[in-house]
Amino acid sequence: MSQTRTARRPFLVTAALTAVLSLGLTACGTGGGESTESPTTSPSDTASASASATESMPATESATPSESATASSSASTAPSGSPSASASASASASETAQGATEATVYWVAMDNLEGIEFPGCGDSSLMESTAPVSGAGDVGDPSFVEAGLQVLLDQTEYEVGSGLTNSLYQSELEVTEVSISGDTVTVDLAGSPISSGTCDDPRIIAQLENTALANAGVYTVEILLDGTPIQEAMSQKGS
């Protein structure tokens, strides 16, 4: 009996040690797993992270089809303007081009003989200039001749500028008729030519004659004052 008991003790001790070691290894395995385990991301966590990243990035807005169509329509309409506005602008430009021209007029250049010479006191000449006129046709049209003469008659200041003067500045004259026949332009005047003296008479006549010739586009001119040639009329009036 004592041998049997002696034989079973080592077995019990061995079983007990095995159990203790098994528990210890299990505990070590559990602790090591906790320290080395890497976190895994669940699908929901991945979706959340992706949404957060998208929100943090600058957003680029894209126009809807209707907005794009509106913008395109506005862009194509703005530069051209309305058809009626364009037509009005073209009409105005055309009227301005046709209605405004420049007539030739002649002024007296005192103490300057570099211009056109004319019979007189030999102390002056005529200098050509231009002036804008409206609704007067073109060179060769009687209305254009009248418009050029009217520039002289409307100038009521003696000095015109740049050393030029107007000998007609005091005269009270009116153009009653202009006619062009062949190479001759005839101008009928009414009123009173006012001269500053004998030397002013030829200046007045020269201004009228050369202005009429230039705008008529002819070579011969006749100026009548109340039906009488102006040279005769002015010689009769006295100074």
Image (cartoon, grey):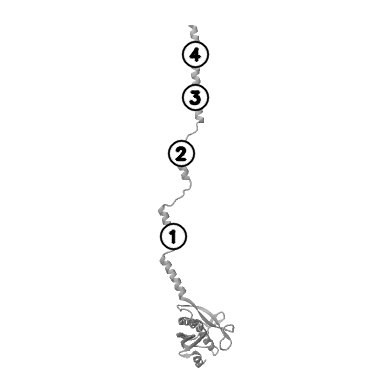
Task: Indicate which disc, 2 or 1, sits on the residue closer to the N terminus.
Answer: 2
Disc 2 target residue? 46
Give x and y (percent) for residue 130.
52, 78
The residue at which mark 1 appears reads as 76
The answer to whether residue 69 is above or below residue 141 is above
> Which residue position is annotated with label 3?
27
Q: Nearer the viewer, mark 1 or mark 3?
A: 1
Dot 1: what SS? helix
Measured from the top left, where is residue 64 in percent x and y? 41, 52
Q: Residue 11: which numbered mark, if any?
A: 4
Q: Position of residue 121 (x, y in %)?
A: 57, 89
Residue 83 visible at all = yes
Which amino acid does the dot numbered 2 rest on?
Answer: Thr
The three-letter code of the residue at mark 3 reads Ala
- The answer to whether 160 is drawn above or below residue 57 in the figure is below
> Which residue is located at x 45 percent, y 40 percent?
48
Label 2 to label 3: alpha-carbon separation: 33 Å
* Element under disc 4: helix
Amino acid identity at mark 4: Phe
